[in-house]
Image (spheres, grey):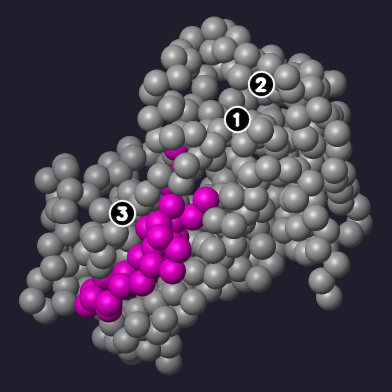
Amino acid sequence: MMTTAKNQQRIAIIGAGPGGLTLALILQKHGIQTVIYEREPFDMNGQRGGSLDIHEESGQRALREAGLYEQFQKLARYEGEDFRLFDKTGKIYMDEVAELDDKGTRPEIDRGTLCDMLLESLGSNSVQYGHKLIRAVPLNNGQHELHFENGYVDTVDLVVGADGAFSRIRQLVTDRDAEYSGLSMIEINVLNAAAAHPELAVFNGRGKMFALDDHKGILAQLNGDGRIRVYLSFEKERGWLDQCGIPFDQPEEAKRQLLELYGDWDESLKLYIRSADGDMLPRRIYMLPVGLRWSRKPGVTLIGDAAHLMSPFAGEGVNMAMLDALELALAIVQDGDVNQAVGTYEEKMFVYSSQLAEESLDNLKLCFGDEAARNLADLMNQYHLQP
């Protein structure tokens, strides 16, 4: 049974991504109210990444606790588990097709759709948009004073950093920063693929396509809105995106130069570049040190990328954020003292996140190493053969 004191504790979540929204919703289901502060003026989740695979043992567990599992099932795309793997010559190494009547454990959902579902259940006024955190000041009693760019100041018993790769809250618990992983990506989009580019849509299939070779890749995934979101990926030094000379604000010229970078790749793969529509988004992939831990600090903790930023090559980013949210929420529900609850959560989180961060780093090295397509196929086949 929850105590009155617990319900009176003021909890602030910085960041309205999937992790922050999930945490707020699970706590709300247990009668504990929070406030979410988001720097953007409105919900931007639909523009931050494409299709996500939600894992049974983590993201789906959190959705069950939040009371959204059945709704998720109606929106999830099990056919999104399809996976094709090629090398640069167009040689195919894997061609997995999910049976429509065989529900897998990692169905897909677009990030925007997932967050819309969470926001709708949370209700209005749960997220305070346009609140960019400038600083969080620890007070002597374990509380924190939050100062926002718009002049607003709040004092809370617990502040949860769900504010991503370059978290402002992280500096309250550790001086470690996100580091460049050695991988740069250029995000492009093939809009309305089935109608506008049917040949490419058939080649891509209903889920993901990876083409890996020469320490670079073309990674593509079909999204729920019919677009194919494509990540042209390069193992490069940190300054490459600034120095490569590709004019990302001039899509046609940029496409010409990108086709030169993939000059000896099969035409079926270069078709992703030729078919791209609209803006291009260059980005660097960052990560925190594998196994990062910090000493317990009163009144503050981290979830998601703020706590354990890793490369996307274990498919665990959003799932870890939602599992963090679940574990932290349940610890708060079960313990009358938020600081004891945070200690319980962090000890669990350090263990599972470090294991998955190591897996993610190993997979990144494999995918952009020699014989990448063959080695990834071997790894995935070993995984499928495990009992």
Image side of residue 212 versus residue 243, left or right = right
Mark 3 Cα within 10 Å, few/some/many (few <14, many 20+)? some
The residues tagged by marks 2 and 1 sit, at their Cα atoms, a distance apart of 10 Å
Mark 1 vs mark 3: which is more N-terminal?
A: 3
Label 1 sits on residue: 232
Image position, residue 134 (x, y; %): 17, 48
Question: Residue visible at 49% across and 77% down?
Answer: 351
Q: Is residue 268 left or right of residue 354?
A: right
The mark closer to the camera, 2 or 1, is 2
Task: Give the answer, above or below, for where 335 lies relative to 76.
Answer: below
Q: Residue furthest front?
A: 370
Q: Amino acid at mark 3?
A: Asp
Name the amino acid type tagged 1: Leu
What crowding class fits label 2: few (fewer than 14 Cα within 10 Å), some (14-19), or many (20 or more)?
Answer: some
Q: Which element is circle 2 on? A: loop
Residue shown at 77% from the left, 35% from the top: 87
| Residue that carries the numbered disc 3 in the rendered image | 177
The magenta-colored residue range is 284-311
272 up-or-down from 344: above or below: above
Residue flagged by tag 2: what amino acid is it? Tyr
Residue, disc 2? 262
Residue 60 at x, y = what percent? 64, 65
Q: Gap between marks 3 and 2, in whole Å?
A: 33 Å
Residue at position x 53%, y 28% from top?
A: 186
Q: Is residue 329 visible?
A: no
Return the mark for residue 247: none
- N-term mark: 2 or 1: 1
Whether residues under marks 2 and 1 lie with C-beta atoms below 8 angstroms apart, the answer is: yes
